[in-house]
Amino acid sequence: MNFFETIINYIKETYTDRLVYFPSNIRVSLLIILFCAIAVLELYIYIAFRRLHQASQNRELKNWKEHIDNMLANLIIFDESEETDDIVAHFYPKMKKLPLRNSVVNKVLISEMLTYHRNFTGQIQEVLSILYRKLGLDKKSKRKINNKNWEIKIEGIREANEMRITEMADEIIKYTDDENALLRMEAQAAYIKLSEKDPFHFLDRAQERILDWHQVVLFEIITKNKQLTIPPFSKWLRSPNDTVVMLCLKLVDHFMQFDAADEVERLLKHHNPRIVKKSVEIIGKLELSDAEKNMFEVYFDQPEDIKLEILNSIGKISSGNYNDFLASRIYSPDIKVKREAFYAIKRDPNNGEDKLREIYKQTTLENQAIINHVLDNRIKS
Amino acid sequence: MSKILIAEDEVLMLKALEFKLKKDGYQVDVASDGRQAMEKVKSNTYDLILTDIMMPFVGGMEILSYIKNDPIKKSTPVLLISAVGLENVVLEGFHLGADDFIYKPFNLNELSVRIKRYIKQNVF
């Protein structure tokens, strides 16, 4: 005890009585040391309190989690012969007793209800959705959607999406063109599922890019959702946003929307080569013979990959109208162009293979090798 | 009383399945990861095994493969739970001898009926 008292007295004296007699550099150093010592002490106290708080929160979380786990597990194993309303009436009073204002309870309950809703089908989903609303958790999701923090917004959108809170669609549409890509993507995916009136309305207002991988996500949602009414996607093929055009072209292709033929043909003159290439691919796949002329007209202005796609599409259409053009391509200096031209000739239903054999007799050695390759049915084009 | 092993790493799902199957009158053993499940499979005999495909340490496919290559345990029906319906995963599962696939999300009552059917088949 005396030892500590001596040290404390020494420090006290140093800073009160003797400080003024030290040279200025020592004084500054002593003050810095004092400041650092106080800062470190405060930091330790803060860390200790934080750990204590976290430990108590974890204990609370564990207790509530177990309680909520059991409650929900009991809820989902109800007798299938019971009516949805009866199950809700049985569990609602129990769940209502939970201290939902407590953020820990709230978080655990929402997360577990979402997990069950995501993993089970049938009456369970309906019961969970009704309870979610009755407990006022939908209002909390709405508040999250309107929060300033984008991460919380996303959390709210996910909750609304999973629980199918359709009335949130009007709130979510605001974020479908947000400059934050993650928020925008989450909002678009949710809007398609939640909007009952016009699930594709976000495409009308989309000015921001729909990223490639998000196009894949949207494509999956649109093509796998059996409840969606599929609109004619040609409606958005004139969009000033290239990524909207691209997504819609993929959907025109998937749903084989022949009504979009004129719009797809128009896109052959689009400034974006990726859109031109996709249009050519669709023209070939849907065998839009009316577009053959336009493809021929744009052919010479296109980069190599689009030229190959055009030859491929002409081959798929196989109208025979461009046989001379295809025959001229077999003398192209580019071997890929030659190969594609030979494949296109082969696809001609009017003896395409015989035509290749005819050409074989009078062409170069290199072309003969390509023809052998093309005629070998074991090799796929 | 028929004995079932449930192997699932998602605690919430594990609990729900456990509650449901216990309610259906089965004796239920649970494993929250693949390694635990493998140990239980090696040291016990079950009438049916319900396992998730994706689990830490040891996957559902490895458990399936072990059971179907064991001369004594190979007749135990194995039902795989999967969130991914990828064709190659399904094919691999059936090649290894899986009796059925359950895709998430699934109907708990339907699962219950399927389990009852497999246990009945295995008993007679």
Image: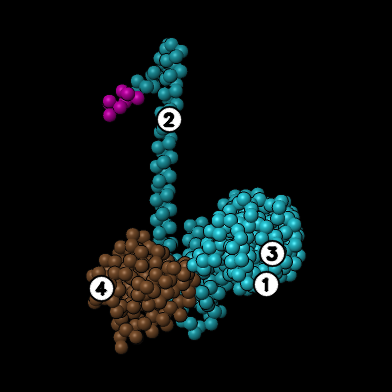
- Give, as a single range, the part of the protein colored magenta: A1-8
- Graded by Cα atoms within 10 Å as few (under 14), some (14 to 19) or many (20 or more), the crowding at tag 3 reads some
> Is B79 left, or right, of A270 in this rendering?
left
For marks 2 and 1 on the same chain, the one whose residue lies earlier in the sequence: 2
Same chain under badges 2 and 4? The reply is: no
Same chain? Circles 3 and 1: yes
Going by the numbered disc 3, the residue's amino acid type is Asn
Chain of the residue under the numbered disc 1 shown in the image: A
**Mark 2 or mark 3, which is nearer to you?**
3
Chain B: colour as depicted: brown
Viewer-nearest of labels 2 and 1? 1
A242 on left or right of A94: right
Q: Amino acid at mark 2?
A: Ile
Q: How is the image coloured?
A: by chain
- Which of discs 4 and 3 lies nearer the camera? The answer is 3
If you read the primary sequence from the N terminus, does the residue marked by circle 2 or circle 3 appear first?
Answer: 2
Q: Which residue is mark 1?
A: A229
Q: Mark 3 — residue? A: A323
Q: Spatial distance from mark 1 to mark 4, Cα to Cα?
A: 51 Å
Q: Position of residue B109 (x, y in %)?
A: 45, 80
Residue under numbered circle 4: B70
Residue toward you, B63 or A177: B63
